[in-house]
Image (spheres, rainbow, N blue to C red):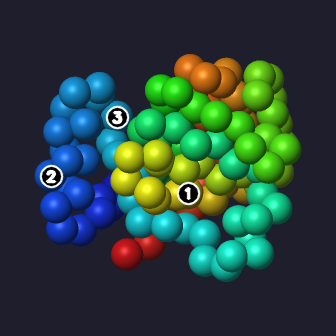
Amino acid sequence: MIRTIVGGVAAGSLALTALIGLPAASASAVTGEDDVRDTPTYTCDLVSSSQLSQGILNCQASNGAVKTGGFTGDAILRDRRWGVHVLCHGGGMAHTPNDVQANECDAGQG
């Protein structure tokens, strides 16, 4: 089950879900500033959050993230609109700027 952000964002998340058919990301799964600083990161307009997470629309790679092709290890998917992020541990596939898929993701807490 995917949890959505509390408050006014939840309604916006539902609207985005209905618009493009993907659930919006849940609360942050990364806790430490140092964890974020060195982890390859993908920032997209919309991120879904589950064991297999996906970022879509205008995705940008940073912190050494692969722009096109497969990747291994940890990666962070950030949702540009809502400012949330999901930490994934099992690598994935990047096709920036269109989309990014990542495996073994923390579904978020909160």
Residue depicted at x 25% and y 37%: 16
- Whether residue 85 is visible here, answered yes or no, is yes
Q: Position of residue 11 (x, y in %)?
A: 15, 52
**Picture quadrant where residue 105 is located:** bottom right
- Whether residue 91 is visible here, answered yes or no, is no
Q: Residues within 10 Å of mark 2 (few under 14, many from 20)?
A: few
The amino acid at mark 3 is Leu
Secondary structure of residue under mark 1 = strand
Secondary structure of residue under mark 3 = loop
In this rendering, would 9 be left or right of 61? Answer: left
The residue wearing badge 3 is 22
In this rendering, would 55 be left or right of 61? Answer: left
Distance from label 3 to label 2 (Cα)? 14 Å
The residue wearing badge 2 is 11
Q: Are marks 1 and 2 in contact (CB under 8 Å)?
A: no
Q: Which image quarter holds the C terminus?
A: bottom left
The residue wearing badge 1 is 86
Image: 66 above or below 38? above
Q: Are marks 3 and 2 in contact (CB under 8 Å)?
A: no
Distance from label 1 to label 2 (Cα)? 20 Å
